[in-house]
Amino acid sequence: MKILLLAHAFNSLAQRLFVALREAGHEVSVELDIADAVTEEAVALWNPEVVIAPFLKRRIPESVWSRRLCLVVHPGPPGDRGPAALDWALLQGRREWGVTVLQAVQDFDAGPVWAWRGFAVPDGLDKASLYRRAVCEAAVPAVMEALARVVPGSAVPAPVAAPALAGLGWQPPVGPGQRAIDWQRQGSAEVLRRIRSADSHPGAQGALFGEPCRLFDAHETTARTRAWVPAFDEAAPGTVLGRRGPGLLVRTRDGAVWIGHVRRDMARTRALGAGDLGDVGGREPATALKLPATRAFAVESAGLPELGVPLHRDDIGGEEEWDELRYLERGPPGARVGWLEFHFHNGALSERQAARLIEALAFARHRDARVLVLAGGPDFFCNGIHLHEIEAAAHAADDSAADASMRHIEAMDDVCLAILQMTDRLTVSVLRGNAGAGGCFLALAADRVWLREGVVLNPHYRNMGNLHGSEYWTYLLPRRAGAEKARSLMRERLPMGARAAVGAGLADEVLVPGDGAAPSALQAFEALAWQRALQLAAAPDIAVQVGAKAARRATDEAARPLAAYRAEELAQMRRNFYGFDPSYHVARHHFVHRKPHARTPRQIALHR
């Protein structure tokens, strides 16, 4: 069928459906929900048989839904209505939830149900992670079922059996007070629940160091961490007690939580280390940015104890220590596998995180592991440079966005180089979550790339203001996909599904677990990836494979050094950052500050 995806933004679910529908043989075009007249024009131009709305913040105009079958993907089970379905599900502690595909009518979320899928709500997930994992996983088969029930010329589906979940109905937006953080009165479980219900937007209202801010990226603490803090029991709730990576340890009424990211709500604030970060040249103040908590409160947290944990650590007493990086090792002597996780918030890689990742790679290189798995994070493998931190540099008296961008790209390049030069073992990128821009090419720096089914890749840069890109992509992409396919991928700038990535040569395999006892699809995939990595490490010809890899790298280096690829890429990036064309700086600013779209990108709006 001809399908129009109508969405507020081309987010993770919209991209997942775009890929899945095209793979199923449908003709799919996308229109971003900018104005009713624009939507009407898109429908007239594309003439779709079905309009699918996976992510909207406004009502579909009656001029469209009254004349065309419009199916809305609602992140709640049948009977749930309102704009804050996942927010309320987490606030209310729901253990079972779902996704409903329903027909658009006059009232919000009140039309006939065409399909739905239920899912269990995993422990410890924030709203954004729940959306990217469970909602996306359930939405794809639900949409496919709904489309299979479409009868040309009819807008009435057969009845669909609905679950009997108690307490469903219209739920309004969550009020500010309903997830405000009161350190004096709320225990850790309540604090975590409230912050997770508001992550990644709009954040929970709270205060750190006596200053109001929005709180994001909250994590549990362990008894061991709390025991490291002198006079922990005497500290008043709300006291910031220590730091780790991007996070600050904050006392609650009955314990403590880690706060990884914040957005300061002050009109003006001190510099992130130096200078004044208020309004600069009419631009928005950097205080509106969501930043790592230790950077947003750099001055206030500078004297706090660093509560670090070893990179290579085991769970203690069933409690897992939170940190951005973690190294695990399994397997018998002579056939061991190292597993390096780097769970960076929203997949963004800052200078600080790149430095930590290089240190972790150096640590792994000194371990007796024949295979090193680069596992990224469960939501994102990596999405490239940290645009929020770069935007913050635009407001610092002693820095600039161009300088910070250049430093970030150099740091990403250093990480890729460390992987490419690891010629004494095999490396495997295991993508549990999506990857974009430089994060894709970070994955391609490994010898093998294994994907989870449903992962979406965006192996291109130009959507961010015509960036040329670096991370050795001019070496890595043609090596895997060929020169012509590499040019096509960069030119088309479209999201790519896991199986298409294998077909194009960007990845080696999609790992599909069989039916088993794993609690979730993600855990089943991780178990299979471990199994395959251990088999690779125990292969009789592993030494031959490693030797052949080292020989190929030496041959490639002799033909053209990696330094030459890097120098050429960075010369182009300097033009992006420092040249006369401001496209990158404008695109970054709009992305970071969630500016509404003025038009739909032409590469996804086929009707235009």
Image (cartoon, helix red, strand yellow):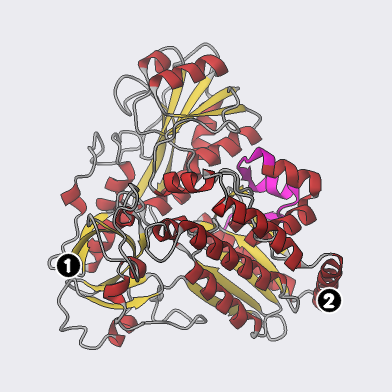
In the displayed structure image, the side of residue 251 where residue 150 appears, left or right = right
On the question of residue 512 being in view, the answer is no
To which residue does mark 2 refer? 547
Q: Residues within 10 Å of mark 2 (few under 14, many from 20)?
A: some
To which residue does mark 1 refer? 210
Q: Is residue 495 above or below residue 389?
A: above
Q: Is residue 135 above or below residue 295?
A: above
In the displayed structure image, the side of residue 15 where residue 261 appears, left or right = left
Residue 109: x %, y % from top left: 33, 29
On the question of residue 186 being in view, the answer is yes
What is the spatial separation of the Cα atoms under label 1 and label 2, in whole angstroms? 58 Å
Front in this rendered view, residue 300 or 115: 300
> At 75% across and 79% down in the image, what residue appears?
424
In magenta segment, residue 39 = no
Q: Amino acid at mark 2?
A: Gly
Which region shows up in magenta?
491-518
In the displayed structure image, the side of residue 480 where residue 404 appears, left or right = left
Quadrant in the rendering for residue 390 = bottom left
